[in-house]
Image: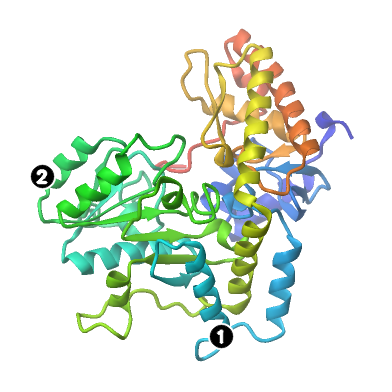
Amino acid sequence: MTPTEKSFGRSTELNARLQDVVPGGAHTYAKGLDQYPENMAPVMTHGRGAHVWDADGNEYIEYGSGLRAVSLGHAHPAVLEAVRGQLGLGTNFVRPSVIELDAAERFLATVQTADMVKFAKNGSDVTTAAVKLARAATGRPLVAICQDQPFFSIDDWFISTTAMSAGIPGSTADLTVRFPYGDLPATERLLEEHEGQVSCLILEAATQHDPPDGYLAGLRDLAHRHGCLLIFDEMITGFRWSEAGAQAVYGVTPDLSTFGKALGNGFAISALAGKREFMERGGLRDDRERVFLLSTTHGAESHSLAAAMAVLDTYEKEGIAARLHALGDRLAGGVREVAEAAGVGDHVVTRGRASNLVFATLDQDLQPSQEYRTLFLRELILGGVVGPSFVVSAALTDEDIARTVEAVAQACVVYRKALDADDPRGWTGGRPVKPVFRRFV
């Protein structure tokens, strides 16, 4: 079957049924039907390594696997072996299991900037727990989020600041303020404006670019000078910048940090880590007022903890973080070369750290365009490549990278035609993809 002969009939049928029983047709908005070209949103059946298959039997090279969660590749043997070894022993007990201690000690041996860790199932739970802990430690109500970063939690303290704030009282939104990334004077002005009210500064240490020299250390000092905590959201940077996160790369230790995604290679596990003086507020050895920090029925399921330890071991033994960077460098170089060759080098733009690449699709005026993104995604899917980004997994091979670059080259030829026509709609196949955060459908 040639690329243009791909069938999506079964996936289209399944998407319609999903919409009937699951709001939005997916359990994560970023996986929604509206994020893919019309009638070309594959519904997956299985994956192996860096490849996935949909309900129509189409095979794809996958990027951004599991929204950056599956960094080792699907069905990784070491992870599966560890999980299978635990399943026969039981997965959840009325008291802590030995593996909870093993996993905590193994995690802290990797993330050596933290003194204590508590596991949960998803990133939102641990970022919200970090915010609550900061409020308790400081006695202050306000949370300061980095305004240049797209997501921290599904909970009200963050979602109230987005375009999808329906159902959240305005008084909740008033408790969250914003600071710009990389601008210490602006952040200091914010802290002075709300002097004595800000409990914490929460941000990703880096996203598409490394931080300016001295920025993170300056931000830590600024936060402490004004009596608030510094929190790093390491959901993405953890296990992509390095196995110990961005804090290890940049040499700045936050008061609290949160990890998830790649920690379980697709199994549900997240972590709140931090300094003992704060973490003990959620324990039994502190005489201050107690904090109901995290208390989750499934947070310490043994098979997910086993998966996490297997991930940590694999990263260490196989140098996975370095491999992710090497693969990303190779992919980015190839994409830029074929984009330039097709005359769209200024319009199809690869950005970000090599281990965490995204692409921008720009129109004739070099502005971000959902229509051109739709065209690009559509051509990639037809070429056997699927993903909302170019975020690599360690399972990719040299052949996979070469095939991806070939698919990008074909997409860029079509992109050039659309630019020459001054209208991409003839190549989008229907309605454009849409941003996740919008007020109405």
What is the residue that sits farthest to the top in this orientation? Answer: 420
**Residue 257, disc:** none
Q: Secondary structure at mark 2?
A: helix
Seen in the image, is 301 located left or right of residue 3? left
Q: Residue at x 64, y 51 (%)?
A: 320
Seen in the image, is 51 located left or right of residue 178? right
Q: Earlier in the sequence, mark 1 or mark 2?
A: 1
Residue 62: which quarter of the image? top right
Q: Is residue 377 visible?
A: no
Residue 109 image position (x, y, % from top left): 50, 67
Disc 1: CA contacts within 10 A as few (<14), some (14-19) or many (>=20): few
Disc 2: CA contacts within 10 A as few (<14), some (14-19) or many (>=20): few
Residue 114 image position (x, y, % from top left): 39, 65
Seen in the image, is 45 located left or right of residue 415? right
Nearer-the-camera pick, 247 or 63 = 247
Identify the image quadrant of the N terminus.
top right
Q: Residue at x 73, y 44 (%)?
A: 396
Q: Which callout, 1 or 2, points to the residue nearer the camera?
A: 1
Nearer-the-camera pick, 334 or 213 = 213
What is the residue that sits farthest to the bottom in this orientation? Answer: 94
Nearer-the-camera pick, 382 or 169 = 382
Which residue is the site of mark 2?
Answer: 193
Residue 39 image position (x, y, % from top left): 69, 39
Residue type of the residue flagged with mark 2: Glu
Residue 42: which quarter of the image? top right
The correct choice, above or below, for 393 with respect to 139 in the image is above
Residue type of the residue flagged with mark 1: Val
Q: Residue at x 41, y 66 (%)?
A: 272
Which residue is the site of mark 1?
Answer: 98
The correct choice, above or below, for 174 with respect to 275 in the image is above
Q: Residue at x 67, y 22 (%)?
A: 427
Q: Secondary structure at mark 1?
A: helix
